[in-house]
Image: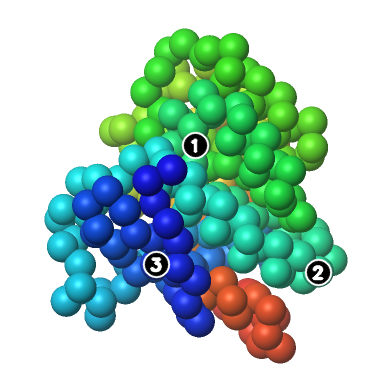
Amino acid sequence: MSYIKIQNHNSVTIKNINNNSSADFTLLTQSIINPKNKQVFALEVTTSFNHNSKKNINTEEFFKTISDDFVKELILIQIEELNMCEYKLNSERIIASINCPFSLLFDSVFVKEVVSLSKVRFAFEICNFKSNTITDSAKRSIRILKSQGHELWLDNFMSEEIPIDALHILRWDRVKIDRTFIYKHMNNHSIVSALYHFVSKNSFKNLIFEGIESDYQHDQIAKLDCLCQGFLYCKPFSLENIQDQQFEAHLAYQYG
């Protein structure tokens, strides 16, 4: 790979050895809640660019160079950090979700490596889904994931970047409804309910509604058999804090 990683105390630096550009990231996570029992079901792992290191980074140039190799390194770093939280995540039966471009499913060797390294149950949140065909290597990747109890989620459904027919192309475990849907249609329960029933026919476990930020939104979505994610429940926090004694406080259900 053309990238190397440098572990720091609270962050990680990924450097492109071809052009010497680099970026410094903090690994964050945000809870996904079951609104009916007020329990944390999953934690989505994300990255936050550290703006205070701008003086050492040509930001525009760096992000133009991001490739699948870069994303692979980032995913492996996320898996390493999650493994350090193995006891907490597994004892609480919390699944970790990791953003994964659709293109990486074509690399079954890499997917097998991630599965072999992971000590926690995880889901690949597939973004940038633009294909209407699935290769044998992608099918192999999905079999590898699911054979070990991991999941495949479709991210950002109902956004402009995800085609409607994406629901029918793969056997998704869960589908995340883009936050823009909530903003546009929260006051029309019939539309929300229709989407719920439509998507439920094509995914095999819970839907996940993103962007829940108010009690009203929570009350409407809680009527459905689904999961929720949003600032109402928990703002993103550093992944390393899962290991400290305030883990429960970070995951505390804020509603009510």
Instruction: Report how many numbered discs are placed on residues in the image.
Output: 3
Q: Nearer the viewer, residue 127 or 137?
A: 137
The local secondary structure at tag 3 comes to strand
Quickly name the residue at label 1. 126
**Residue 188, visible in the rendered structure:** no
Q: Residue at x 58, y 41 (%)?
A: 124
The amino acid pointed to by label 3 is Thr
**Residue 251, visible in the rendered structure:** yes
Whole-number angstrom distance, CA of label 1 to CA of label 3: 24 Å
Quickly name the residue at label 3. 13
The local secondary structure at tag 1 comes to strand
Sequence order check: which comes first, mark 1 or mark 2?
A: 2
Viewed as shown, does residue 19 lie left or right of 83? left
The amino acid pointed to by label 2 is Tyr
Q: Nearer the viewer, residue 164 or 244?
A: 244
Question: Which is more foreground, mark 1 or mark 2?
Answer: 2
Sequence order check: which comes first, mark 1 or mark 3?
A: 3
Quickly name the residue at label 2. 87
Q: Residue at x 64, y 44 (%)?
A: 114
Image quarter where the N terminus lies is: top left
Q: Residue at x 49, y 71 (%)?
A: 7
The local secondary structure at tag 2 comes to helix
Tag of residue 199: none
